[in-house]
Amino acid sequence: MRVRQSNTMEYKITERKKEIKVKIFNIKLISKERKGTEAYIQLIERVFKNWPRIDVGSHRAIEFMRTIKDKDILLYYGQIIKYTILDDENWYNRKTNQLQSYEIDDDMYPNSVECKFFFLPEIHRFCYIDKNEFSDKQMEHFLRSSFQTAINESEELKIDIEVSLDAINEILSADIVSRLEIDVSYTNNDLTEDYEMFVDDDLKDTGVSSLHLVANSRKKSTLDLLKSKLLKGYLMLSRKNGSATATIKNGKKPRKKIITKDHPNRLSLQVDKEFMEHDVYTQMIQRYKSKKNE
């Protein structure tokens, strides 16, 4: 918090500021029937209408608890909730020392925890405030299953969690990279660096929706990623549009496998407590929106 200033108004405004950490999923609709921002508006509104409850394992489920469409900006936000699903059968009665049935109210679920989410159709990003109770795998399964209910038979979905740049840099800076495996799909005109744009445009121009690439080094050698515009471009593109797995070695340390999806990015955003949704929207748009989207 900033030191108290003589100007009372400035102090009060500073008091409202806080930092949040969000994880980000890139949700891409591959369709010949619809595209652009309007397609993602239709998609999210269909998801909300379907209101799916998704089983994420261990008798736990996730669903949208509260959904809001902002009146001033193109943003959907609200809460998702995770809870436990209990069965009516085989309850243990300690008093009688017997198993018995126990009728549970169909609308009541214990061990619930909420999480705030934001969806921006313009950049097809779903982000949520990071909470330990919501694992990356559970969230990916929830989103994939939920959005799957809203697409047509001829359409396809690509959903990727954005990974940490540190994981990518660890691969690029390794002494030895003996194997690199990349799964990547093209962007929907995201803001990209030159080397990412090179491979992204190549995927689009050749009609490829997704690509699986495996590169192995020669014996006692390494993949020189910094010299390869192709490999570096695909690796960087996979940060927000896929995933990568690399086998690396540094000095006398043992070989190490890096799976980028195991290292999700936790983006820090500075927000005003009273205008959180608008602050999230502004910072996300600045970060991801390319002029091609306009």
Image: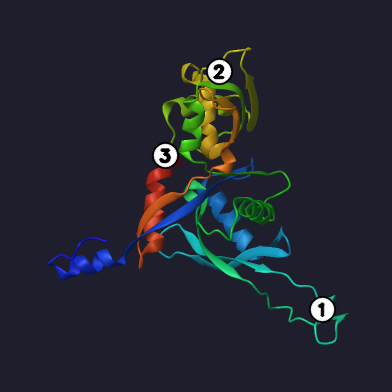
SS class, disc 2:
loop
Query: Which quadrant of the view contains residue 16?
Result: bottom left
Quadrant of image for the C terminus: top left
Total count of labels: 3
Label 1 vs 2, first from the N-terminus: 1
99 sits left or right of 228 in the view: right
Quadrant of image for the N terminus: bottom left
Label 3 vs 2, first from the N-terminus: 2
- Mark 3 vs mark 2: in front: 2
273 sits left or right of 97 in the view: left
Q: Position of residue 281 (x, y in %)?
A: 41, 55
Label 2, on which residue?
223
Q: Residues within 10 Å of mark 2 (few under 14, many from 20)?
A: many
Q: Residues within 10 Å of mark 3 (few under 14, many from 20)?
A: some
Gap between marks 3 and 2 measured at Cα: 31 Å
On the question of residue 89 being in view, the answer is no
Amino acid found under the numbered disc labelled 3: Ser
On the question of residue 59 being in view, the answer is yes
Q: Please give the name of the residue rendered at 79% of the width and 73% of the height, measured from the top-left corner.
A: 87
The residue lying toward the viewer, choosing from 28 and 220, is 220
Residue lying furthest bottom in this view?
95
The residue lying toward the viewer, choosing from 120 and 217, is 217
Q: Please give the name of the residue rendered at 38% of the width and 60% of the height, measured from the top-left corner.
A: 278
Query: Which quadrant of the view contains residue 18?
Result: bottom left
Gap between marks 3 and 1 measured at Cα: 59 Å
Applied colour scheme: rainbow
Amino acid found under the numbered disc labelled 1: Tyr
Amino acid found under the numbered disc labelled 2: Leu
- Mark 1 vs mark 2: in front: 1
Q: Please give the name of the residue rendered at 64% of the width and 50% of the height, measured from the top-left corner.
A: 137
Label 1, on which residue?
92
The label number, if any, that marks residue 290 in the structure image: 3
